[in-house]
Image: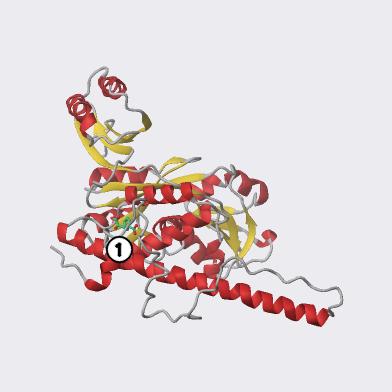
Amino acid sequence: MEMPEMPDMPETPGKVDKAGKPAKSAASGQREKSAQPVQDQAPAQVETAVRPEQPQSQSQGQSQSADQKFLAAVRREIDWVDEEILSLLNKRARISKRVGRLKAGSGDPVFKPTREKKLLDRLTAMNPGPLPNEHLRAIYREIMSSSRSLQRPQKIVYLGPEGTFSHLAAMEYLGHSVEYLPKANFEAVFAAVSRGEAELGVIPLENSLEGSVGQSLDLFHRHDVFIQAELFCRIRHALLSKAMRMEDVSVVYSHPQPLAQCAQWLHANLPNAALIPLESTAAAARTVVDKPGAAAVGQSRLAEMHGLSVLASGIEDAPDNWTRFCIIAASRLADGQPDKTSILFTTPDKPGALAAVLATLAEAGINMSKLESRPLKSEKWKYVFFADLECDLYAEEHKKALALLREKCHTLRLLGSYPSGPKLDLNRE
Ligand SMILES: O=C(O)C(=O)C[C@]1(C(=O)O)C=C[C@@H](O)C=C1
């Protein structure tokens, strides 16, 4: 059992009022010892600096200096607010470290996506503005990224090299305070997670235009990993090159999925260019760095990373282009009330076998949002089904349905329950 620590005492749960607010404002309480206040006293009132009236007789020089004084006053207010935020962030960090020590004691995982989703939903619901909810969520994703890594250093594996959509999606969702490790292929991502070399892995599952990433689905069959979270990312593609004009491009490299997602645009705008598939968009960007007549299709941020020009952007054939990614881990999520479950199953080889599985779900009132069959590699013309169910199939209320499913299926593996994912825009600068 953890010993209470005196310096953390103000954060003990006892000191909250009935509404759950700290009895005394943290920021108005003791300041962080390390923080160097810009001024000792808070401005008498914040957000209230009033622009002085400017007499008609004032010269341009006099009115400019009044403006400067006013700006300095407003900036002092910002400085003061920043100190308050700093103090509160450190207070939060200390509490998070305590949660981390409790988790370590009980062997509980650090990453709690259901709790994170609830927290973001609660804050956005009570946000009075003018801070837009999208900004609030982005800020909080970084706060939680720091919080997780303070509890225990986090390693996240993804299909590299740096700058792939998987990498950008992972950073958008899990923030920048964790360590990202690129892997050469999806197999290596799954292996690193199942061996415990990394806490979490990020893999693309399906695209709204191109359908499932078959390789990802197949790997679930071979590796003992679980889905702990999902996220949907808006995908925009750009044409990136060392060449300054499109007329100079004779060959285009990318991953097969982006090449397919931009097929019509490429055909209309670069009808004579050869289209060459590579293992990732980031590898394509690297490849064209020293090939002046070549271009890569990928996310525009790759241009900055590799010193390329963006010859065209938004080149995907349908603008509403989304990819669903999932976060995989070695254990299943046992936290909160997740609202989705993914399963892998095979059916007996007899008439109506699949219908019986579907009827079991229907009778239990469970909605199925995805069903995909994949070849069972060990036996030709046999299939394994991957399904997404809109429920927590581990929950007590579905115990009977789960037992029935086990009866109707030849094999059944639960791939984990997780909260339904947010929609994130990777093109936010
Ligand atoms: O609530 C927890 O379990 C925490 O560890 C706190 C916290 C947070 O910073 O808010 C951190 C990590 C989890 O993924 C969820 C939330």
Q: Quadrant of ligand 1?
A: bottom left
Whether residue 241 is visible here, answered yes or no, is yes
Pick the quarter of the image with the N terminus. Answer: bottom left
Q: In this rendering, is residue 79 above or below 22?
A: below
Q: Judging from the image, what secondary structure is the residue with disc 1 in?
A: helix
Please indicate, yes or no, whether residue 154 appears anywhere in the rendered image. no
Query: The residue under label 1 is which amino acid type?
Result: Ser
Does mark 1's beta carbon lie closer than 8 Å to ligand 1?
yes
Nearer-the-camera pick, 354 or 253: 354
Instruction: Name the residue beneath numbered marker 1.
Output: 96
Give the crowd class for mark 1: few <14, some 14-19, many >=20 residues within 10 Å: some
Residue 74, image x, y percentages: 62, 72
Residue 90 rendering spot, x and y as whole percentages: 37, 70
* Res. 32 image quadrant: bottom left
Which residue is farthest right?
57
Residue 303 in the image, given as x and y percentages of width and height: 56, 65
